[in-house]
Image (spheres, helix red, strand yellow):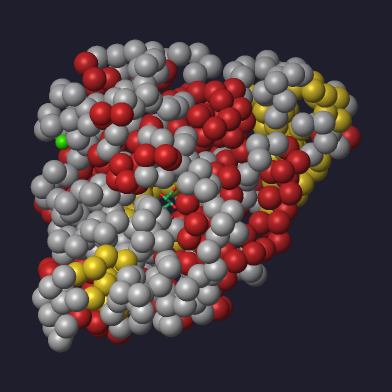
Amino acid sequence: MPDAWWKTAVVYQIYPRSFQDSNGDGIGDLEGIRSRLDYLVWLGVDAIWISPFYPSPMHDFGYDVADYCDVDPIFGSLAAFDRLAADAHGRGIKIILDLVPNHTSSSHAWFMESRGSRDNPRRGWYIWRDPGPNGGPPNNWISNFGGPAWTFDDATGQYYYHAYLPTQPDLNWRNPQVREAMHEVMRFWLKRGVDGFRVDVIWHLMKDELLRDNPPNPAWTPKDPAIERLLPVYSADQPEVHDVIAGLRRVLDEFDARVLIGEIYLPLERLAAYYGKDLAGAHLPFNFQLLEVRWSAKAIARLAETYEASIPEGGWPNWVLSNHDRPRIAARVGAAQARIAIMLLLTLRGTPTLYYGDEIGLSEVEVPPERIRDPWALREPDIGVGRDPARSPMQWDAGAFAGFSTHEPWLPLTDDWLTRNVETMRVAPGSVLRLFRTLLWFRRSRSSLRSGDWRLLSAEDDILAYERADSRERTIVALNFAAAPRQWRHPDDLRDGLIALSTQGDRGSDPIGPILNLRADEGVVIAAA
Ligand code: TEU
Ligand code: CA
């Protein structure tokens, strides 16, 4: 039985606003993505996950959906989506959409009806409550984007709940009509050939029905990861959430070979539950640990061992380095260690998700205060510029606006865009883009990397070494997390191995002695029989 495609695939996240503009408005769109499919084939990715492109007032850039079954004109049309899907499938690239079931936009027809009156049939589709005893919000829950998670609606004299912006009211997933309506949304896209969904904030879907106050978290400060703020709010980790996820999975399973990826910012010991009872939950509960881990050989060794041990029998791991909500890997660990990170991501066991732009080493753009667009930063200035620096336009060439658009892009380019772009780096020996592509194609050629076992070899002296093996071959990876040379004594029986590639370009075919000398910030992959 061949492995499910999503187990051996490499997923590539596209933030549609920032990938390629096709109509000169400075904002990326679906036609722009379609025009770059040949690049994605060249790079060697197997699936694209596209962040939301549905009709939206764009208060949270599409994560505030006003119509789940259409395309916002700024991104194109359903016909443009169908063309993109057909061309992607024609090139062997799968399409994964971003489903945002936790909340709608306050401009969604469902919410407009729900707020119409207390006895509207859709009143129970959202979470409405009378004011608390002191006339204020029903409890002390706070929004992920600052301020109370409750907004008062004068017309009907009640508060409604929102985990994010006041214009992102949470749906009430205890209501079977809400579940059925969202199942129909999934079927709409699955019938259009979509290969799966990344489900936004899937662990938030069920709230504590009694809306009990949460113990105030005095230790929390705005600089903490937002998730620390939310954990008390969802600390009940409602058991019913797994019924809801199993319901989403049943819809998916009405169609062949689809994947359900769950966005879940939870510690590893709680993440495993989202594979579901008898693996009937998410195929890939997103593992965000590399976004937060202390960047060292020992910490990552411990993380990988803990994660491997936490996955239920038959479950499949996944790893990610960056996304549209967090500073990019190159900004977190620097350019040299970002190469180590890429080799780590593409040689650990499980499905890797790449974030667009990481392959050209995009880091943080300077976003002047007047150009900040992230609603979270606009509501909570003390968190700084927010998420915009990780959402800057893709840089394609050294032409105007880096080939992203013929118009000033919606966010600035990086200062070094003249050299940090696909066309320039595609032919530059030793560029991070060429490393990325070589690793992707090497991974594709090695069954041990696509689906072999993982075994830690060592994590001493700043070197993380591990082995991937199956019945046919072994691949050894040795990563130097130090900015200084290090030596590594590998297992003696590696004498027949050869260094397949290094993060620092050609190492020649020097035979491997009993000691491997690694340069500062260097990682190597060794192909052994
Ligand atoms: O993010 C969920 C989530 O927890 C993040 O909001 C994260 O905690 C926050 O961005 C602070 O880092 C999803 C989407 O990825 C995010 O872009 C949306 O803003 C959010 O949900 C609401 O839909
Ligand atoms: Ca456009």
Q: Residue at x 37, y 39 (%)?
A: 381
Give residue 470's position: percent from left, percent from top.
69, 51
Along the horizontal axis of the image, is 228 left or right of 121? right
393 vs 317, left or right, is left
Query: Looking at the image, how many numbered discs can be counted on the residues?
Result: 0
Q: Residue at x 67, y 17 (%)?
A: 507
> In the rendered image, which quarter is residue 163 located in?
bottom left
Which of the image's four quarters has the C terminus? Answer: top right
Q: Is residue 227 visible?
A: yes
User: Can you say whether 110 is above or below 310 in the image?
Assistant: below
When the figure is inspected, residue 478 is found, relative to residue 516, above or below; the finding is below
On the image, the x and y values in percent for residue 196 come to: 36, 60
Q: Position of residue 291 (x, y in %)?
A: 55, 44
Of residues 32 and 472, the one drawn nearer to the viewer in this rendering = 32
* Residue pictured at 71% horizontal, 56% vertical: 306
Residue at 27% in and 71% down: 160
Please indicate whether residue 215 sits to the left or right of residue 484 in the image. Answer: left
Residue 326: image quadrant is top left
